C-alpha cells in the first residue's frame, strides 16, 4: 500500500461554516438588547416629597437632547474626563407646570434623533390633600406655627396661608407630612376671628386655593402681676424681676436696653409655671434709665400677648429729698418740718451733719429710715429761714452717695389772729393782726351777710399779708376783720340772725330802731337799741381799743367810695377811688343809695372818736376782688 503525504491532504473551510450563524445570532441579540434598552419605555412615578429620579446609564450625556412638553429632564451622577462628560448614572424629571394626576411620556436621544432614543412614562399620582375639612377645629395661637396635616409630604409645591391681606409661607414639617405655617408673621390679634385661606402654588404661579375657612385666635395671655411698674425708680440693687400671667408659660422673648439705645444688654429668662423670671446682669449703671421689653410670651396652650409689655425703670443714684411737710409761708413759730427722702439713709450717717437750718432756731433729728425732722423753736414772726440738705449722704439701699445739695426757703407766719366776739348764733368773729407798729390801719368786711365779695376780698387780703407782711412799714400795724356777720354769710342774708342791719346798729346822733331800706321801713332794723347786737358790740370794742389811723370797710355793690368826712377821710377816699377807678359819694350817699342812712359804723367812729373812715362799694355782691384792690390796699397801709 502506498502512503499519502499528509501535506498533500485537502483543507476544509470552517470559517464559512460558522460565520453567518454567529453574525445572525449576534445581530439578533443586539436587536433584542437594543429593543429592551431603548424601545421599551421606562416607568417613573412623580414624587411630591423628593426628587423624581431613576437609574439610567447615559453615554456621552452632553450630546443627548430631551423632548417633552410637560417635564424637563436632567442627568445626575456624571463621570467626566477633564471637562468632557463621559457617562451619567441617573435621570431625573421635573414638571414644567403644576402637575396633574395622569401619565406623560418623555424621550431622550443623541442629538434628539431616532437612534438610541429612550422613552419614559412618568405617572403623576393624586395630589396631596388636606387631612381635615377645616384649617383648625379650635382656636389657634397667634404666636406659634399652625400645623395643617396633608395626605403626603409635599416639597414640590409651595403653600401659603393668607389672612386679612397678609400672607405667610407654610413649610414642610421635619417630623411628618404636615405643613407648618408661621402665624406670627401675620401679626394676628389674640381672641379675634378672621377669614383665612390656604393656597398651593408651583414655581410661584399656577396658584390654587385649597380651602377658605374661619380662623379664630386664642384669647390673649394676661399679665396678673409685675414686680416693676412703668416709670418706677428702683433704689435697691436688683438681681432681676418677675412677671406672672394667667396661664403656665411655654416660652418668652425679652430684651433689656438703656433708654433710647438699640443695644441690648444680656439677660437670662426662665419660665416657672405661670411666672417669667428675668435675671439682670450683676453690674448695672446707677442713675440710668432702662427699658425692659417682653416682646412675646406664649402659654402652654398657645395663648400669646396682645401686645408687647414695656417697662421703663430707673436705677437711682444717692438719696434725694422728695418732699417737706411745710410750705413756703405761714409756718408756725414752733412748727415741725418733716423731710422725706426717696430711699433709706445709711444707718451710719449722722443726719445733723448734713441737715442745717439758718434764720431761725431749730432742732434736727432722724425720725425714720427715710425721714428726718426740723423742729422750730419759738421763731420770730415773719422771719425768713432756709433748711439745707448737703450732698454726700450715703444710701442704705445701694451704697450710692447724694451728689447734689437741696434747700427749702420758708417764712414764719407773719400775723396772729384772735376772736374779738361772737355772733347771735355763737359763731366766732376773728381779727387778724400783721406788723407791730403803733399806728393801726383797720380793714373790715361783710358787715352785711349777702355781700360775700367783701368777705372774699378781705380773706384774700389776709392771705396776701400772711406771705408779704414783712413789707409793712416799720411803725405800722394792719388789723383785718374779714367777716363781721358770720351768721349772715352762712345763710346768705343781709341782716344778722335777729334781722338787724349791723351797719345801722351804732350809737350815732341819728340812730333809729326802725330804719328805711330799699324795700321800705324795717321795724327794729337798726336794733332794739344802739349796739344791741353782739357783732356790732365786738366791732365797737375793737375800734375803741385800736383807735386806728384810718378804717376802710368793704361793701357791695356799685364801684363807689364814701367817706365819713372826719379828719382826712376825703383825701384818703380820693386816693383809693383814683387808684381803683371808682366814683365817690361824699355828699350824695343817701341819694345814691335811695334812702336815709342812720346809725352807720363809719359815722359813729367820726362822731365818738374823731377818726377818719372810708367805705368801698365793690363791683358786685359775689367774687374776689383782692387782685384789683391790692395797690390801693397797700397805699392805705402807708397813709
Image (cartoon, rainbow, N blue to C red):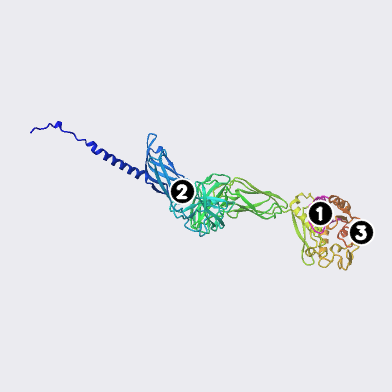
Q: Residue at x 33, y 42 (%)?
A: 31
- The residue tagged 1 is 440
Magenta run includes residue 601: no
> Residue 420: image x %, image y %?
78, 61
Between tags 2 and 3, which lies in front?
2
> Residue 609: image x %, image y %?
87, 58
Q: Indicate the quadrant where residue 225 lies.
A: bottom right
Earlier in the chain: of badge 1 and badge 2, it is 2
Task: Give the SS element for disc 1.
Answer: strand
> Residue 371: image x %, image y %?
60, 54
In the picture shown, does residue 59 fall above or below 227?
above
CA–CA distance between discs 1 and 3? 32 Å
CA–CA distance between discs 1 and 2? 106 Å
CA–CA distance between discs 2 and 3? 110 Å
> Could you tell me if the residues under marks 1 and 3 are in contact, i.e. CB atoms within 8 Å?
no
Total numbered labels: 3
Left or right position of 606 against 73: right
Task: Give the SS element for disc 3.
Answer: helix
Which of the numbered marks, if any, corresponds to residue 591? 3
Which of the numbered marks, if any, corresponds to residue 156? 2
Crowd rating for badge 3 (residues with CA inside 10 Å; few <14, some 14–19, many 20+): few
From the viewer's side, name the closer residue of 219 and 127.
127
> Could you tell me if the residues under marks 2 and 3 are in contact, i.e. CB atoms within 8 Å?
no
Q: Which residues are magenta?
A: 612-639
Amino acid at each position: 500500500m502506498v502512503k499519502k503525504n499528509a501535506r498533500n491532504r485537502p483543507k476544509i473551510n470552517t470559517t464559512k461554516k460558522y460565520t453567518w450563524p454567529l453574525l445572525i445570532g449576534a445581530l439578533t441579540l443586539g436587536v433584542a438588547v437594543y429593543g429592551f434598552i431603548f424601545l421599551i419605555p421606562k416607568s417613573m412615578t412623580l414624587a411630591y416629597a423628593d426628587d423624581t429620579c431613576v437609574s439610567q446609564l447615559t453615554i456621552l450625556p452632553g450630546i443627548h437632547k430631551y423632548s417633552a412638553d410637560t417635564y424637563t429632564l436632567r442627568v445626575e451622577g456624571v463621570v467626566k474626563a477633564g471637562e468632557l462628560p463621559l457617562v451619567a448614572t441617573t435621570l431625573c424629571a421635573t414638571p414644567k407646570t403644576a402637575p396633574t394626576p395622569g401619565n406623560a411620556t418623555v424621550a431622550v436621544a443623541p442629538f434628539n434623533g431616532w437612534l438610541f432614543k429612550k422613552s419614559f412614562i412618568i405617572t403623576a399620582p393624586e395630589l396631596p390633600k388636606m387631612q381635615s375639612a377645616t384649617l383648625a377645629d379650635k382656636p389657634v395661637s397667634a404666636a406659634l406655627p399652625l400645623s395643617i396635616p396633608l395626605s403626603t409630604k409635599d416639597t414640590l409645591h409651595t403653600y401659603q396661608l393668607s389672612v386679612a391681606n397678609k400672607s405667610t409661607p407654610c413649610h414642610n414639617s421635619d417630623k411628618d407630612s404636615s405643613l407648618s405655617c408661621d402665624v406670627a408673621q401675620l401679626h394676628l390679634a389674640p381672641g379675634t376671628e378672621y377669614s383665612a385661606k390656604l393656597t398651593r402654588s408651583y414655581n410661584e404661579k399656577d396658584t390654587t386655593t385649597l380651602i377658605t375657612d374661619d380662623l379664630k385666635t386664642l384669647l390673649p395671655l394676661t399679665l396678673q402681676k409685675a414686680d416693676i411698674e412703668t416709670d418706677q425708680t428702683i433704689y435697691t440693687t436688683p438681681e432681676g424681676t418677675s412677671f406672672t400671667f394667667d396661664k403656665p408659660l411655654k416660652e418668652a422673648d425679652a430684651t433689656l436696653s438703656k433708654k433710647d439705645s438699640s443695644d441690648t444688654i444680656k439677660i437670662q429668662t426662665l419660665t416657672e409655671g405661670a411666672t417669667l423670671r428675668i435675671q439682670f446682669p450683676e453690674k448695672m449703671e446707677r442713675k440710668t434709665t432702662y427699658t425692659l421689653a417682653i416682646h412675646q410670651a406664649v402659654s402652654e396652650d398657645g395663648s400669646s400677648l396682645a401686645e408687647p409689655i414695656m417697662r421703663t425703670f430707673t436705677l437711682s443714684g444717692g438719696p434725694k429729698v422728695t418732699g417737706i411737710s411745710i410750705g413756703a409761708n405761714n409756718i408756725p413759730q414752733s412748727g415741725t418740718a418733716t423731710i422725706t427722702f426717696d430711699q433709706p439713709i445709711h444707718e451710719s450717717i449722722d443726719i445733723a451733719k448734713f441737715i442745717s437750718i439758718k434764720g431761725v432756731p431749730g432742732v434736727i433729728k432722724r425720725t425714720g429710715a427715710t425721714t428726718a425732722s426740723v423742729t422750730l423753736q419759738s421763731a420770730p414772726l415773719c422771719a425768713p429761714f432756709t433748711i439745707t440738705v448737703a450732698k454726700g449722704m450715703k444710701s442704705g439701699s445701694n451704697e450710692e452717695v447724694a451728689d447734689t445739695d437741696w434747700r427749702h426757703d420758708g417764712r414764719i407766719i407773719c400775723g396772729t389772729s384772735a376772736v374779738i366776739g361772737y355772733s347771735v348764733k355763737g359763731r366766732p368773729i376773728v381779727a387778724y393782726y400783721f406788723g407791730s407798729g403803733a399806728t393801726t390801719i383797720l380793714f373790715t368786711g361783710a358787715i352785711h351777710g349777702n355781700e360775700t365779695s367783701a368777705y372774699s376780698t378781705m380773706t384774700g387780703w389776709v392771705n396776701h399779708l400772711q406771705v408779704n407782711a414783712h413789707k409793712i412799714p416799720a411803725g405800722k400795724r394792719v388789723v383785718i376783720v374779714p367777716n363781721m356777720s358770720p351768721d349772715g354769710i352762712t345763710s346768705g342774708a343781709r341782716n344778722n340772725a335777729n334781722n338787724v342791719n349791723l351797719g345801722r346798729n351804732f350809737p350815732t346822733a341819728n340812730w333809729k330802731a326802725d330804719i328805711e331800706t330799699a324795700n321800705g321801713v324795717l321795724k327794729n332794723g337798726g336794733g332794739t337799741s344802739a349796739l344791741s347786737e353782739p357783732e356790732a358790740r365786738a366791732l365797737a370794742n375793737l375800734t375803741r381799743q385800736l383807735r386806728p389811723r384810718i378804717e376802710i370797710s368793704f361793701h357791695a355793690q356799685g364801684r363807689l367810695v364814701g367817706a365819713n368826712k372826719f379828719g382826712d377821710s376825703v383825701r384818703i377816699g380820693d386816693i383809693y377811688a383814683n387808684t381803683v377807678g371808682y366814683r365817690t359819694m361824699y355828699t350824695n350817699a343817701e341819694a345814691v343809695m335811695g334812702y336815709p342812712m342812720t346809725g352807720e359804723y363809719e359815722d359813729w367812729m367820726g362822731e365818738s372818736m374823731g377818726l377818719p373812715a372810708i367805705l368801698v362799694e365793690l363791683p358786685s355782691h359775689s367774687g374776689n376782688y383782692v387782685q384789683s384792690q391790692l395797690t390801693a390796699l397797700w397805699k392805705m397801709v402807708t397813709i
